[in-house]
């Protein structure tokens, strides 16, 4: 049930005055969409309806491995990497989106 998640997202949108949501889409390495990507598209469509906001999709392929390399080069222990990997990957997804719209 997405309702509680949507409610929480809407609260953050209102509190932080969010103007744009960027959602990572997990494409296959050959650029096709699999089961997880289709679920993400469904989530995106439902969230757009709930928030009345357009949501941008950004390819998230390789962001976790890129984040891992970054954290290893920063000499973070495996335990600490595990705690922050998703946040770093999300930052990379957002940065890739910003770089793309900047061009």
Image: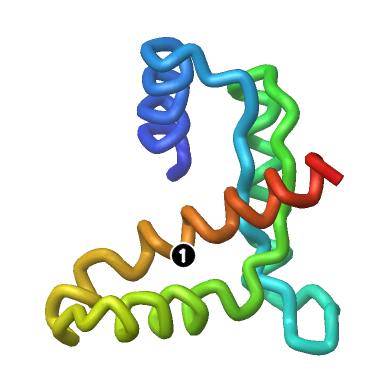
Which residue is at the front of the view, 41 or 26?
26
Indicate whether 102 appears above or below 8. below
Q: Residue at x 75, y 87 (%)?
A: 29
* Residue 93 on image: x %, y %: 59, 57
Q: Is residue 91 toward the left or the right of residue 51 in the image? A: left
The image quadrant that residue 52 belongs to is top right
**CA neighbours of label 1 inside 10 A, class few (<14), some (14 to 19), many (20+):** many
Indicate whether 73 appears above or below 85. below
The image quadrant that residue 85 belongs to is bottom left
Q: Residue at x 61, y 34 (%)?
A: 21
Q: Is residue 54 toward the left or the right of residue 26 in the image? A: right
* Residue 15 on image: x %, y %: 37, 12
Q: Residue at x 55, y 73 (%)?
A: 63
Indicate whether 76 appears above or below 90. below
SS at circle 1: helix
Which residue is at the front of the view, 95 or 12?
95
Q: Is residue 50 toward the left or the right of residue 7 in the image? A: right
* Residue 99 on image: x %, y %: 72, 50
The quadrant of the image that shows the N terminus is top left
The image quadrant that residue 78 belongs to is bottom left
**Would you name the residue on which mark 1 appears?**
89
């Amino acid at each position: 049930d997405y309702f509680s998640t949507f409610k929480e997202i809407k609260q953050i949108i209102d509190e932080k005055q969010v103007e744009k949501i960027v959602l990572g889409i997990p494409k296959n390495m050959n650029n096709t969409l699999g089961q997880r990507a289709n679920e993400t598209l469904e989530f995106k469509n439902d969230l757009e309806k709930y928030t009345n906001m357009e949501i941008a999709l950004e390819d998230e392929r390789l962001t976790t491995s890129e984040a891992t390399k970054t954290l290893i080069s920063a000499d973070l222990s495996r335990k600490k990497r595990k705690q922050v990997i998703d946040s770093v990957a999300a930052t990379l997804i957002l940065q890739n989106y910003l770089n793309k719209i900047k061009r």
